[in-house]
């Protein structure tokens, strides 16, 4: 009885949030729409990171590389071969996913900080290679997207992008919800908690880590396509930034790593705050929006381990001690 | 013949750079060894050291090498404050490694943004005679600033080694690094040692920042990044728990960069460094001079 009530309640809350999200552009101005849209995109990237960073417990600081690989793949296909990004994004995911599998193989040997270092070096390497192979990537000048039209995932106003990213974010949550109760997802968590024990109950640690990293990178690559379609040009130095890798991880950790909602919660708090600060002070004070990431990250990690979602869940559980 | 001497010249200046890499890596290595945590803000402390040199030299007209002492003390204090805020509260909790990674990442972002806000992104430099005076030994020219930076780096590394071997606190630092539980059992105040180590490590980074600023006049808020990567590479190369390994690893990395520049283009040099770095990381994570690490 109690459980059913909780389920209906959850359903109502979810439906309400969905409706609010869906009709939001109808009564908000372009600036607000654009802020929320970016929050969705970062939420999706944070959720993608969560697969390997949260559920897998492998702290990657190189996800900007997958973002860039995805963005470059679909953009090269679009500009060079006239392949629509609606198709190209899957290719982007595959290319990024293959790179992710390489990182996954590396994670078998590199633990903790060594893995984080390795991913930083990997991202730097990707950036340098993108700069080096000028013939394909345009080198430091990057590639400008000159096509147009919805069939090429290019829109005149912000509203269609809003819905695109809204759907992307929802897909991310649904995926993680399915993923965390899937056989593979449970195996990945088991590997995070204790590799030897996981091996003992018959989980193939090697395969689990490699596929986990590949899935995470695949999703990030798709995010990269969407990002490129939105900003209309790509360049190694604006895509492969340690700041981006950091931001993706920070959003997820602040929101609550290893949960389907952590990415969204973190992005809804951090992205609007930083964009708002940016808009408020403009180019005058360049560092102000970033400082926020530092301060919030510091406070959350020291004061509320488990992130904001973890805090909310603990609060709710305390209120309902009979439903554990 | 002219070409050959130009190459030697280049290699020597990269070897000198490598010696300074050694000093920048030393603080990182100490903290890593004692806390089993990477200080991601290391390069940013180095950057603060550079600005310390800039301000003390331009405002008070102090010699940059006295500024190095100022930076050591100032950054040591900042380091201890950072430790109290960001490291000590999380270091012993479960998942402490990830937590310190995140908190120092937070500190890094805060320091960079503060520097951007306070001092603007444009690069600065200060007047100093050492940079513009040159020495010539065996036909190889180097600026006095570079030569001093190299000598001071090596001397500091030797001094730290002696400190760790002979002074009581230094011995305690080594004890905590090797076996924190055992150290506690024999009555060492482990949290205090961690605080001292973090202060020392950050102080060394600050000093390295001043030395770098004497010959590399490019003081800007994101300057730490280059040195960050170099320090990580050197620490990984040297392996943990070796003090002198850091010097050799630094020089090897410096010379590798030099060769990369000669044999390939300048753009390819960096690619080479990262490829070598990843290869070492994957094939020999305990480093070239390190003992085998216990699996974390």
Image (cartoon, rainbow, N blue to C red):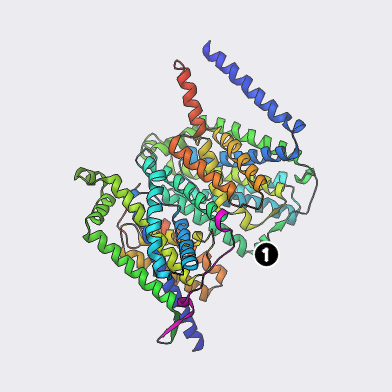
Image coordinates for residue B242, horizontal then vertical, percent: 31, 61
Image coordinates for residue A36, horizontal then vertical, percent: 67, 37
Q: Is residue A41 above or below residue B176?
A: above
Image coordinates for residue A258, horizontal then vertical, percent: 50, 35
Image coordinates for residue A117, horizontal then vertical, percent: 46, 53
Q: Magenta stretch containing residue B124, yes or no?
A: yes
| Left or right of residue A303, residue A17 in this image | right
Relative depth, front residue between A148 and B123: B123
Residue reaching furthest to the top: A1
Tell me which chain the residue with mark 1 is part of. A
Q: Report which residue position mark 1 lands on.
A: A135
**Residue under the image location 68 percent in, 62 percent down:** A141
Secondary element type, mark 1: helix
Q: How many marks?
A: 1
**Residue under the image location 45 percent in, 73 percent down:** B14
**Residue under the image location 57 percent in, 41 percent down:** A46
Q: Is residue B259 above or below residue A255?
A: below
Q: Which residues are magenta?
A: B117-138
């Amino acid at each position: 009885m109690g459980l059913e009530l909780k389920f209906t309640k959850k359903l109502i809350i979810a439906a309400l949030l969905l409706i609010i999200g869906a009709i939001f552009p109808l009564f908000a101005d372009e600036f607000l729409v654009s802020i929320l849209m970016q929050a969705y995109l970062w939420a999706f990237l944070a959720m993608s990171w969560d697969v390997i960073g949260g559920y897998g417990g492998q702290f990657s600081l190189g996800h900007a590389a997958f973002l860039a690989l995805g963005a470059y793949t679909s953009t090269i296909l679009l500009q060079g071969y006239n392949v629509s990004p609606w198709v190209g994004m899957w290719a982007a995911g595959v290319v990024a996913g293959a790179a992710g599998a390489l990182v996954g193989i590396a994670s078998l040997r590199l633990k903790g900080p060594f893995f984080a270092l390795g991913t930083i070096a990997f991202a730097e390497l990707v950036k340098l290679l993108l700069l080096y192979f000028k013939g394909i990537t345009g080198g430091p000048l990057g590639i400008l997207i000159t096509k147009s039209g919805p069939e090429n995932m290019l829109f005149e106003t912000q509203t269609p992008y809003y819905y695109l990213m809204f759907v992307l974010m929802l897909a991310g949550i649904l995926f993680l919800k399915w993923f965390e109760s899937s056989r593979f997802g449970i195996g990945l968590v088991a590997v995070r908690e204790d590799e030897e024990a996981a091996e003992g109950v018959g989980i193939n640690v090697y395969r689990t880590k490699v596929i986990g990293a590949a899935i995470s990178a695949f999703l990030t690559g798709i995010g990269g396509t969407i990002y490129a379609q939105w900003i209309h040009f790509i360049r190694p130095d604006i895509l492969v930034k340690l700041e981006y890798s950091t931001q993706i991880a920070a959003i997820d950790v602040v929101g609550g790593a290893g949960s389907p909602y952590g990415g969204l919660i973190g992005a809804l708090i951090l992205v609007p705050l930083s964009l708002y600060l940016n808009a408020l002070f403009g180019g005058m004070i360049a560092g102000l929006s970033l400082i926020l990431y530092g301060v919030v990250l510091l406070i959350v990690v020291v004061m509320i381990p488990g992130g904001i979602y973890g805090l909310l869940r603990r609060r709710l559980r305390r209120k309902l001690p009979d439903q554990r | 013949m002219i070409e050959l001497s130009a190459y030697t010249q280049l290699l020597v200046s990269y070897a000198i750079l490598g010696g300074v890499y050694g000093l920048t890596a030393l603080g990182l290595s100490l903290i890593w060894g004692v806390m089993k945590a990477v200080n991601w803000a290391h390069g940013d402390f180095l950057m603060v050291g550079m600005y310390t040199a800039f301000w003390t030299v331009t405002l008070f007209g102090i010699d940059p090498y006295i500024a190095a002492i100022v930076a050591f003390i100032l950054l040591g204090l900042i380091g201890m404050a950072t430790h109290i805020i960001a490291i000590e509260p999380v270091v012993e909790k479960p998942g402490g490694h990830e937590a310190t990674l995140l908190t120092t990442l937070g500190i890094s972002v805060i320091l960079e943004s503060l520097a951007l806000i306070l001092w603007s992104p444009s690069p600065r430099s200060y007047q100093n005679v050492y940079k513009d005076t040159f020495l010539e030994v065996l036909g190889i020219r180097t600026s006095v600033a570079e030569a001093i930076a190299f000598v001071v780096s090596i001397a500091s590394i030797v001094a730290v080694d002696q400190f760790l071997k002979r002074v009581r606190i230094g011995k305690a630092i080594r004890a905590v690094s090797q076996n924190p539980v055992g150290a506690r059992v024999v009555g060492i105040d482990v949290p205090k040692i961690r605080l001292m180590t973090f202060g020392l490590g950050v102080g060394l980074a600050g000093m390295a920042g001043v030395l770098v600023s004497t010959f590399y006049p490019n003081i800007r808020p994101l300057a730490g990044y280059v040195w960050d990567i170099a320090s990580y590479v050197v620490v990984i190369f040297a392996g943990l728990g070796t003090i002198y390994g850091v010097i050799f690893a630094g020089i090897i990395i410096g010379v590798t960069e030099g060769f990369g520049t000669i044999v390939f283009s300048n753009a390819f040099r960096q690619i080479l460094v990262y490829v070598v770095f990843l290869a070492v990381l994957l094939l020999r994570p305990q480093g070239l001079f390190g003992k085998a690490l216990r699996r974390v």
